[in-house]
Image: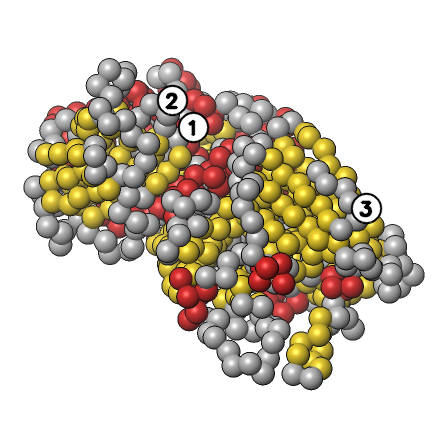
Amino acid sequence: MTNERQGITWGHGALRLEIGIGPDGDIRLTHLGPPGETAEAERHRAALPLIEVTATGHGRHWSSHRLIDTTIGARMRHRRHHALREDGWHVLTVELHDPETGLAADVVYRSPDGLPVLRSEVVLRNEGKSTLLLESVTSLAVGGLTGALESADLLWADNDWLAEYRWQRRPLRLTSPRLSGRVRHGSGKGAFTQAGQGVWSSCGSLPMGGLADRQTGRTWLWQIEHNGGGWRWECGVREDTAYVALSGPSDTHHGWRHPLAPGDVFRTVPVALAVGGDDGPDGAFAALTGYRRAVRRPHPDHRRLPVIFNDYMNCLMGDPTTAKLLPLIDEAAQTGVEYFVIDAGWYDDNDGGWWVGVGAWEPSASRFPGERGIHEVLDRIRERGMIPGLWLEPEVIGVSSPLAQSLPDEAFFRRDGIRVTDNLRHHLDLRHPAARAHLDQVVDRLVGELGIGYLKLDHNIDPGSGTSSRPGEAPAAGLLGHNRAHLDWLDGILDRHPHLVVENCASGGMRSDYALLSRLQLQSTSDQQNLQLYAPIAASAPTAVPPEQGAVWAYPQPEDSLDEVAFTMANALLGRIHLSGRVPELDPDARALVHEAVAVYKAIRADLPQAVPAWPLGLPAWDDPWIALALHTPAATYLTVWRRPGAVDTTTIRLPYPIDAAARAELLYPSISKVTTAWDPRAAELTLTLPTAPSAVLLRLARPEADAP
């Protein structure tokens, strides 16, 4: 690291960051990219302050047709900096200070060794004499990304219930058009902006984005690691180059305000930015995948990848009973399942009225009759060699639950002193000790008394802007506080029960974020019930979550054709199998396809935690007739290809990756497929014919001598 007053150079073999420091201490991030890359002069001119802080009474103004930045962030000056190495991470802390307000900031950059990814967060301290009312704080701001604006494309992912991970790509110039010469300093008003909403972090769009140069292939990808809707990013043009700014909640988009009294501290939400090479978005997603593995909490599940059966999707659909579960348990065990999860309804004694009465999470006596109750079912699961799991929606209390009266009003989301109700449910505020004590007692009882080894934590309401625990607290500030308390509660669960496997779910993929997924082991990718519509979701899921954390439903039905059974099973083979459906009712040929899929998955799953994803036909569009997902490992490439109705029967897939010239394409699943393939190693092209639609196959490309599953 360079320590001279004129600047800081910091990084490692995969990433270099340069910060310029002026004679008066003015400090700006001048370069972020691969080592050896020289930043053009125009990119230096476009350098931004390390952070942007807006507070009431401290903003921007116009002078002589030019926007003058008088925000606190622009006034901050370099105080000191230091670097260290920490458990495989490079860490740089830059200390800043605003002499006018007394606000101090620690800008903390982290990067895992060998990966071109920067993680950033900011810690603010009020060292002044007056309270500052914060309105927005960036976690990372980077200017000068590229001057090739005419070839720059924005990337973002629309994300809706039943239609998750739908990536879009549009020219940057559509939202940041070329301007005439009057205005020299863009205000960001013409930038492309994405922002979260409500309590779900990925409702409407993923907390992610990107910028790609369609000529050079260089791609920047970013993610905001926040478990609520209070996040925002913008990407636009300043000084004829592209910039990006990433932040948590703001006053403009979320009504967020935070009073920072003298001596108080505020920490922003973490964000990460991956810098790809010349291999387009695939290279940046590979880097981000490696980063996600480095930043998450270690857990045995990430290496073992056990097969899971869940009784919900296209199966019991929230109506479990002893009589219905026992044959499913026996069939799952014969199939090779290792965890059996009882989904919603196991606590319902109200003939389907459980939605408004949830909260106590006690097993139903009517659904599990007899002296042993639910223990009969749980013991059968264990007798068949599987680990039992349960569904839970911990953050909600139904309006008719006794807990709605016994817990104090302060334990719930409130606004203007009134308890918030959404869809006949109240939402717990986990900052309150009574709320947290209730949930701790529930989890400890389920794990300790029932022997549960797997929890699926769901979340199915969106109670709006947040909560005010005290007069004057902005609901968005209360929501941020609850979000952080939620993460702390999850950390506590896993500290007490380190082998418990916890799945993250919110009406499918409505909380796909890496605040939660850096802690929890799996992510439910969707509630989509149509096997053909699930294909683009399953193929795109590795953009948001590493393959070994992406739970994908496979739900064969007795009325499905053999091609359809293979299609739904193939959906899950490069992720985490969440088997469901009416498996005991399948005919022998269809059942054999299910057993075969599980056996193939067990043979290849040891490779998945080291694999990085790629999309040789491009990121899937919702209606694409051909879809392909590749996972690259040092020894082999696994490739799932889907053909949906409306496509011709042949496609050519280019795989410009380090695949051995002697490699051949081997069919792994299904063995009954009539697929034909021709691999051209010189062109790195695979021509593939699937004679029927819908159909899907899993292939392995490797040298013939490589071990085959």
Whether residues under marks 1 and 2 lie with C-beta atoms below 8 angstroms apart, the answer is: yes
Would residue 580 appear left or right of 404 to someone viewing this image?
A: left
In the rendered view, would you say 28 is above or below 403? Answer: below
Rendering coords of residue 652 (x, y %) = 17, 44
Residue under pointer 2:
606
Depth check: give the residue in front, 367 or 303: 303
Amino acid at dot 1: Pro
Q: Residue at x 59, y 80 (%)?
A: 183
In the rendered view, would you say 101 is above or below 582? Answer: below
Q: CA distance from mark 2 to mark 3?
A: 46 Å
> Dividing the image into 4 quarters, which one contains the C terminus?
top left
Would residue 657 appear left or right of 683 to someone viewing this image?
A: right
Whether residues under marks 2 and 3 lie with C-beta atoms below 8 angstroms apart, the answer is: no
Amino acid at dot 2: Ala
Q: CA distance from mark 1 to mark 2?
A: 7 Å
Whether residues under marks 1 and 3 lie with C-beta atoms below 8 angstroms apart, the answer is: no
- Which circle, 1 or 3, is nearer the viewer? 3
Residue under pointer 3:
80
> Dividing the image into 4 quarters, which one contains the N terminus?
top right
Q: Residue at x 37, y 38 (%)?
A: 613
- Disc 2 crowd rating (10 Å Cα; few below 14, some 14-19, many 20+) is some
Q: Residue at x 59, y 25 (%)?
A: 497
Depth check: give the residue in front, 590 or 314: 590
Rendering coords of residue 572 (x, y %) = 31, 36
Number of the label disc, if any, that sits on residue 609: 1
Rendering coords of residue 48 (x, y %) = 65, 60
Rendering coords of residue 506 (x, y %) = 47, 48
Question: Visible in this render: residue 510?
Answer: no
Number of the label disc, if any, that sits on residue 453: none
